[in-house]
Image: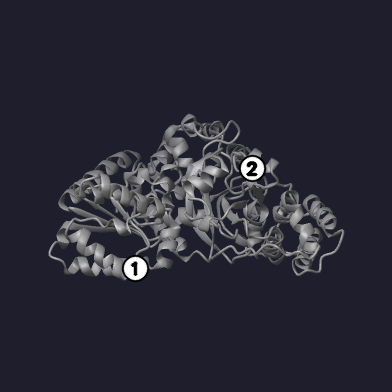
Amino acid sequence: MKKLQVKDIVKIKKDIINQELILRQSKKINVIVHMGTCGIASGAQRILDTLLKKIAESKISKEIMISRTGCIGFCGREPMVTIEMSGQEPVIYQELNQEKILEIFEQHILRGQPLSSYALARGRQQQVKERIKQKRELPSEAITEKLIPGIEEIPFYRNQELRVLRNRGLIDPEKIEDYIARDGYKGMAQALTAMNPDEIISEVMTSGLRGRGGAGFPTGLKWQFTAREKSETKYVICNADEGDPGAYMNRSILEGDPHSVIEGMVIAAKAIGAHQGYIYCRAEYPLAIKILNKAIDQAKEWGLIGVDILGTGFDFDLKIYRGAGAFVCGEETALMRSIEGKRGVPRPRPPFPAKAGLWEKPTVLNNTETLANIPQIILNGSTWFASVGTEKSKGTKIFALTGDVNNVGLVEVPIGTTLETIIFNIGGGIPEGKKFKAAQIGGPSGGCIPSQHLNAPIDYETIKELGAIMGSGGLIVINEDKSAVDIARFFMDFCQEESCGKCTPCREGTKRLSEILNNIWEGKGKEGDIELLEKLANILKDTALCGLGQTAPNPVLTTIRYFREEYEAQIGGKKRHKKFTLYH
C-alpha cells in the first residue's frame, strides 16, 4: 500500500472509525475471543474454532462479527469471551469450555438471553448472595440483568487505571488499523514533525517517567546522556527478556498491543539520533514474537518505520533478537553482548551503555513497559502523565499478580497504590479464608513484604526502605501456611542456577547461601547459620559485578528481617510451615 504521510494519520483514523461504525451497524452482535497466551493455554483456540463453526452454520451469520484480542487481564478466569449485543450491556464470560460456549451460543447469541451463571461477576460468593436477595426483592425480569454487572462494577477492573494497558481487550493486535483508530502513531507523528530531540527529551524528563524494568532510573535522563554523545551510530533496544518467576507483564504488552512499543522506540530513536533498534525477546514467548513480526511488517508497509518515516526524512529500522532464556541476559550489558553474538555475561560499568553500549556505540535500553508509556506522554503531555503517582514516582505500574490470591492476573494501578488495595480489592483476597503472610515483589531480585506493611504505598522509595525493589512488576502473594525459609531457598536456588559465573562473589556466594538455606530446610541447620546468612548476603550485595548478584540476597535478608523466628524454629527442629510453591 501507499506509504503514509503525517496528514494521513488523522484521515485514516477517521476512515477506520467510520468503517467500524458501518460494520457494527450492519452487525447486531460482536463476539470477542481473548487470545493471549493465558487464554490459548486454557483452551481459547478451541472456543474460537467452535464459535466460527457455529456462526458459519447459523442463519444469522451475517449479523455476527467475531474478533480476537490479546489478554484482558483476568488470567485466572480464562478462557474468556465478551459478547456485545445491540441494546444490551457487554457481557464477559469466564472459565469457558466446549459445553459452556455451545450453551452461550444458543441462549445469548441466537436468542439474546445472557447467561448469568457463566458471566464474570463481582465475586462468586457475592454473586450467590445477590441472587438470593434479588429473587426476593426484584421482579423476575430484572434478575438476569442485575446479576451480570458492567465491567466498571467488577472490583478487579474498577480499581485499576489503564494507561499502558488502555487497549487491553479492545483491539486486535494483528491489525494496525485498530491501533491507529485509538490514536496510535499520533504521538510519533507529533515527535517527528513538531518537536526537536531536546524537546522530546525534556517532555519525557518533565513527566517523571522512571524505568519500569527494575531500578527506576529516570528515563529522560538516560536519553539525555545518550543524545549528548557524539557518534554517527547509536542504538535503541527494547528489553523484553522477562525471566522473573511469575512475571508476564512484557509478554502481555507485546501480545496485546505491539505497536505501542514500536511507536515508543521510534520516538526514542528520534530523541537520541539512532536509526537502528532491536527488541530482545525471550524465545519462550512464541506468540509475542509472531505478533511482533507481523506488527513490524505492517509498520514497514505503512511507512511507519523504515526509510523516510511519514515523509519527515527520519529513518529507523527495527529487528527482533530472540534470547535463549538466560535470566542474566535481562541485565543490560549482558543483553547487548548476547545481541553481538557473544556469551551473555555482564561487563563492568562504567562505561555505561549511554557511552559504550551495543558494539561499543551509544545505546538507550528501556524495558517494554517503559517504551509503551512514551507515545502517550508525547501525545497527552508530561502534566497528564504526572497527574497520577507520587511526588517521586509518577504514572502507573503494571503488576503480574500471582500466587495465593483469588484473582490471578495482570493489573495496572497508579504508583503509590497500597499493597492491600492490590491484593484484596483487586486480587480478591486469599483463597480458602487463609491469612495473608507476605508478598514477594520484584522477583528473585526483590524481597518479601509482610502483613504489617499491607498499607505501605507501592513506590520505588518505600519498597526500597522495606528491603525489596519494584523490579519489573512480579507480585507473588503468599499465605500464612508457607515457610519463609523455603521462600528464600526457592529464590536463592533460582539465582544460583541462573548466575553466569563470571564474578566470584555471585558464583560462589549464591552457591553457599543456597547450601545453608537447604541445610536449614532439611533440618540440618545449626546455631550461627542465620548470622552467617546475613554476613554472606551483605558481602554479595556489596561486591557482585551486576544487578543479579547485588540483589540476589534480598529474599534472604527480608525473610530474616521479618520472619527470623521461623529460621530459629527451623534450626531448633520445629518445622511448622509448608513448602513454598509458586504455581498451584
Give residue 489's quadrant in the image.
bottom right
Q: Secondary structure at mark 2?
A: helix
Q: Quadrant of the C terminus?
A: bottom right
Alpha-carbon span between mark 1 and mark 2: 40 Å
Note whether residue 260 is visible: yes
Give amino acid for label 1.
Asn
Q: Residue at x 17, y 48 (%)?
A: 25
Q: Are marks 1 and 2 in contact (CB under 8 Å)?
A: no
Callout 1: SS: loop
The x and y percentages for residue 192 are: 44, 38
Camera-side residue: 525 or 565? 565
Disc 1 marks which residue? 97
Q: Farthest residue toward the front?
A: 136
Is residue 575 found left or right of 141 in the rendered image?
A: right
Q: What amino acid is labelled 2 in the image?
A: His
Which of the labelled discs sits on residue 453, or is there none?
A: 2
Look at 67% across and 54% down and name the residue there.
445
Residue 441 visible, this angle: no
Does 296 sit above or below residue 459?
A: below
Label annotation for residue 568: none
Which picture quadrant has residue 326? bottom right
Task: Write the residue at 32% across / 42% down.
Answer: 9
Residue 19 in percent (x, y) is at 21, 48
The residue carrying pointer 1 sits among few (fewer than 14), some (14 to 19) or many (20 or more) residues within 10 Å by Cα, namely some
Q: Answer with mark 1 or mark 2, whichever residue precedes in sequence.
A: 1
Q: Position of residue 440 (x, y in %)?
A: 63, 53
